[in-house]
Image (spheres, rainbow, N blue to C red):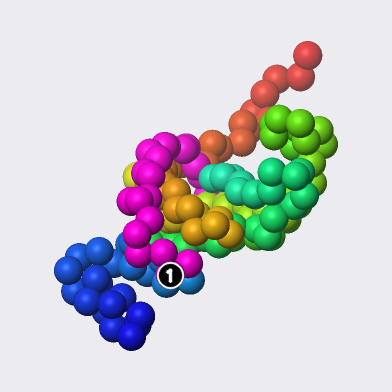
Amino acid sequence: MRISRVTILQRRGLALAATVLVSAVAFAQPAPTRNYTSFEATSAKPVQIGYYGTARKDCTPAPAPTIRVIEPPKSGTLTVRGGELTTSAVTGCPKLKTPAQVLFYQARAGIVGTDRIVYAVVNQDGKIDGYDVTITITEVPKAPDVSSEKPI
């Protein structure tokens, strides 16, 4: 029965909310928040887009959130890696270590222009945060030609 509700929601253009909420089965949940940001990248090395971890109120680690890619990049690759986040940003939880998901973007060689990715982060309570990222891809800087320099 729940699957048919998801199918109906997808037909009405709510694919983002329906697809993400399937694991949480929380149809009464408020709409996801949307965060917009931008990065600069080259094909020379990956760019870290973000890292996401959660903790419980009693300062114990919670399972790493789930990353759902809604719109994959067209001019590069998006990689999600598991890791461990150590932070003192949670009040009352100094040096908290918790499982995390880390996102990296790598532009394809020879590409210059813009790319875009849209993804959602879902925590264990079903809270959804949406991210809309614009990436400006520039040429890889050329190394200076040291053979033409005059010796000192």
- Residue at the spot 54% in from the left edge and 36% down from the top edge: 141
Crowd band around label 1 with a 10 angstrom C-alpha radius: few (<14), some (14–19), many (20+): few
Give the image quarter of residue 25: bottom left
Q: Kindly state the secondary structure of the residue where label 1 is placed.
A: loop
Q: Residue at x 35, y 80 (%)?
A: 2
How many numbered callouts?
1
The structure residue drawn at horizontal position 22% and vertical position 76%, both measured from the top left corner, is 8
| Quadrant, the C terminus | top right
Q: Which residues are magenta?
A: 24-45
Q: Quadrant of residue 58?
A: top right
Task: Determine whether, in the image, residue 80 is placed left or right of residue 75.
Answer: right
Q: Is residue 25 magenta?
A: yes
Q: Say if 11 sits above or below 101 in the image.
A: below
Q: Is residue 62 visible?
A: yes
Work out whether residue 45 can be spotted. no
Q: Which x, y percent locates residue 113? A: 35, 45
Q: Is residue 56 above or below residue 4?
A: above
Q: Quadrant of the N terminus?
A: bottom left
Residue that numbered label 1 is attached to: 25
Please give left or right for residue 54 compared with residue 95 in the image.
Answer: left
Disc 1 marks a residue whose amino acid type is Val
Residue at image point 20% right, 65% down = 13
Q: Nearer the viewer, residue 62 or 145?
A: 62
Q: In x, y percent, where is residue 138?
A: 44, 40
- Name the spot of residue 48 as percent of width and height, x first: 59, 45
Q: Residue 99 at what x, y percent from top left?
A: 72, 55
Residue sticking out furthest to the top: 152
